[in-house]
Amino acid sequence: MSTERLTPTSYLVLGLLEREGPSTPYDLERQVAATLGNFWSFPHTLLYSEPPRLAGLGLLRETREQDGRRRRIFAITSAGHEALEAWLEQPAGVPTELRDLGLLQLFFSDLAPAAARLRLAEHQLAIHGRKLSTYEGDARLERREPTSGRGLRTVEHWRGETLPMGLLYERAAVEFWAGVADRALRSAEPDAALGSDEPQTA
Amino acid sequence: MSTERLTPTSYLVLGLLEREGPSTPYDLERQVAATLGNFWSFPHTLLYSEPPRLAGLGLLRETREQDGRRRRIFAITSAGHEALEAWLEQPAGVPTELRDLGLLQLFFSDLAPAAARLRLAEHQLAIHGRKLSTYEGDARLERREPTSGRGLRTVEHWRGETLPMGLLYERAAVEFWAGVADRALRSAEPDAALGSDEPQTA
DNA sequence: CCTATCATGTAATCCGTTACATGATTAT
DNA sequence: ATAATCATGTAACGGATTACATGATAGG
């Protein structure tokens, strides 16, 4: 057996294969892109390197297509199923972290010219606003006639259970960065201290 | 020169040294623990390995204490200052991600017994509730007489600018997980479908 | 047919983590 | 003094990212 540690990525692969059945790395990639990839992105190469590793641990079984493309197909084994379930039974104790580059830059924004903070805030506001729109669009989607049975369960579970946290988070982020931008603007205008809506000019 | 890439950790170190002046890795550790560590944790060894690397790039200057402990002291150079400012001028384009283990488990919670989901939700609710309390305590703190000038600026900037996002996020998380726990409870009770508060028993 | 993009994969590199270790300081 | 904890550091390891590459499929 090669190295034994199971990472979050490992469980992600196990979980997808459990739900979707035997899949190629590319199948997994498409599943992730539409759903979990919003919260947990990674390069596609991970989905080519991790499954073979899990196969080496006996948690997956690898087969090959016989026709032209000879793709690698991975399926979960009973050992894999047990590992996945054991992980789900034991809730993660690590405190969630907001590992956000924008927040890191904000944290140090007093070390750069004031204009930089305003730019940062507007940038982040735009990013989170876009993401919020996307989520709201996803949430509004009625289940139209399924274009394919493939991956439906994953998408529905995503939409029903996980996406709502994304909505809450993005709304909070938009509110936050709007406030930062607003304060940055005010502190740039000397008139701001008056706190009045009346134009002060002439 | 050794490897040239500057990571978020690099800027974290540069920023702290810019604000606090020459410091030992342990000094940095204490600054981070009380502030940014809430959003962006890492093992203390990073603060011993990253500064020498930055020194190799000319962004820091390293000196040694002469007395007993002979600690390594790092100070930012003008090249370091420029690198930091350049980074702050260029807002991060990467979309923030909610890389949360709890959400990952929730995403796969349909693959385990229903009890596991309830346990997960209650666990997460407790974690986020604790964190929220901590943040609220931090936010309420009046600036009492500074016990030491060291690090004050960092702490105040943290409290004023960055902590508010933590509050918003933790409130959202508490709301979210409370809802998940609630639904998990209801779906465990057959009576739930009636949607009434009256006890149905007998 | 030719070109562009999709789909699939390999290999090297490196940052961050884990494991280990020991000299100071403080408490009893 | 002695134990316990604080403070400081080194070294190896490995998963994730980056860079690279090429065979299918579709569009013009």
Image (cartoon, coloured by chain):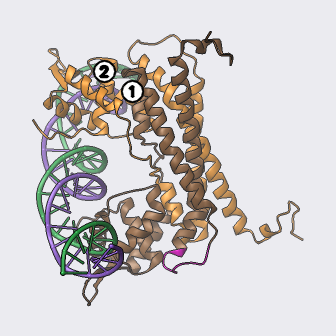
Chain colours: A brown, B orange, C green, D purple
Which residue is painted at 31% across and 62% down in the image?
A: A5
B79 lies above or below A202: below
Taking A107 as reference, is B58 left or right? left
Overall secondary structure of the magenta stretch? loop
Q: How many labels does the image show?
A: 2
Assess whether mark 2 and mark 1 are in contact (beta carbons under 8 angstroms). Answer: yes
Write down the quadrant of residue B201 in the picture. bottom right
- Residue at the spot of label 1: A108
Which residue is painted at 26% across and 83% down in the image?
A: A69
Q: Residue B55 in the image: x percent, y percent?
A: 16, 28
Q: Which amino acid does label 2 sit on?
A: Glu
B66 lies above or below A149: above
- Residue at the spot of label 2: B18
Taking A71 as reference, is A105 left or right? right
Marks 1/2: CA distance?
A: 9 Å
Q: Is residue A146 magenta?
A: yes
Q: What residue type is labelled 1?
A: Phe
Q: Does the magenta stretch include residue A41?
A: no
Q: Residue A72 in the image: x percent, y percent?
A: 28, 80
A87 lies above or below A144: above
Query: Toward the viewer: A195 or D18?
Result: A195
Please tell me whether mark 2 sits on a helix, a strand or a loop. helix
Please tell me whether mark 1 sits on a helix, a strand or a loop. loop
Q: For the residues tagged 1 and 2, is the chain the same?
A: no
Question: In the rendered image, is residue B126 in sight?
Answer: no
